[in-house]
Image (cartoon, rainbow, N blue to C red):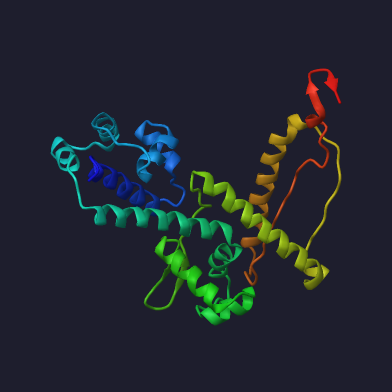
Amino acid sequence: METNRPFRLYLRNELLKRAKRNPRFSIRAFARQMGVESSSLAQILSGKRALTDQMCERLAKPLALSPAKMRTLLRSVPDAEQDSTFQQFQRLQEDQFQVIADWYYYAILELTRTDHFKGDLRWIARVLGITTAEVRSACEKLKDLGHLTISQQGVWKDTLSSTLNLGNEYTNAAFREHQKQLLRKAEAALEDIPYSERVQSSMMLVGSRARVQEAKKRILHFIEELDEFLKTGDTRDEVYTLSVSLFPVSQIQKLTVSKGQSI
């Protein structure tokens, strides 16, 4: 039986509680609060790194654990209980990954804000062009994560205030998958959606690498402004997606071997 397993279990439970309260809470944020490297904390949580008494004492300080609580946590617990919590921890990450990766999770949440929304799985499936099974699975995960509530009166409410951030290698992978799905939908929209109901435009331009970060800020500001403009209209009768891409099509810098020398 592993030494200090209860403390590892406590850390996992604490991360689960904080992540459920705040969708943006991540392992990286937890590590900052604990005063350790995120990679080290991830290994501790997964059981890949031994949890010494010294590390337990170090982590106990930001958690404000009493001496009595520490004594309790520095004992062993059955494997089954530890494994159950780890499975919970993994399941939470997997569900959050799906919410970020699959486009229709956010679409379902936005759909609840439309004027003529119907809390019917088949209706949602029809208007989004997905299966009822996909809607059912997505809604269950959204409810489990606290991003969607359905009252006894059947009122659906989107409670996700901001974009999720897993704070680890899953985040970038999930967002990449999300963007790929939206690019495929954009391609389909070229054929399926009348031009009067969409805007798909692009331009080729020369620019400075040094100004890209400022360009990103301006793009994000524009997105926020457009979001505010569209949602404050008299009616909310459709769910839209807005995708913006800015990337180099040339690779001049990569051809530079050293300063002042090019291939």
User: Hey, which quadrant is residue 58 in on the image?
Assistant: top left
Seen from this angle, which residue lies furthest left? 68
Residue found 48% across the figure and 70% down from its top: 139
Q: Position of residue 155 (x, y in %)?
A: 44, 74
Q: Quadrant of residue 84?
A: bottom left
Can residue 119 be seen at all in this image of the molecule? yes
Provide residue 93's location: percent of width, then percent of height: 45, 54
Residue drawn at (31%, 47%), measured in percent from left and top?
Answer: 14
Q: Nearer the viewer, residue 55 or 19?
A: 55
Q: Quadrant of the C terminus?
A: top right
| 75 versus 116 height, above or below | above
The answer to whether residue 160 shows anywhere in this view is no
Q: How many marks?
A: 0
Where residue 51 sits in the image (x, y, percent)?
29, 36
Camera-side residue of 20 and 257: 257
Position of 60 with respect to 227 (left or right) is left
Residue 48 x, y percent position in the rendering: 38, 41
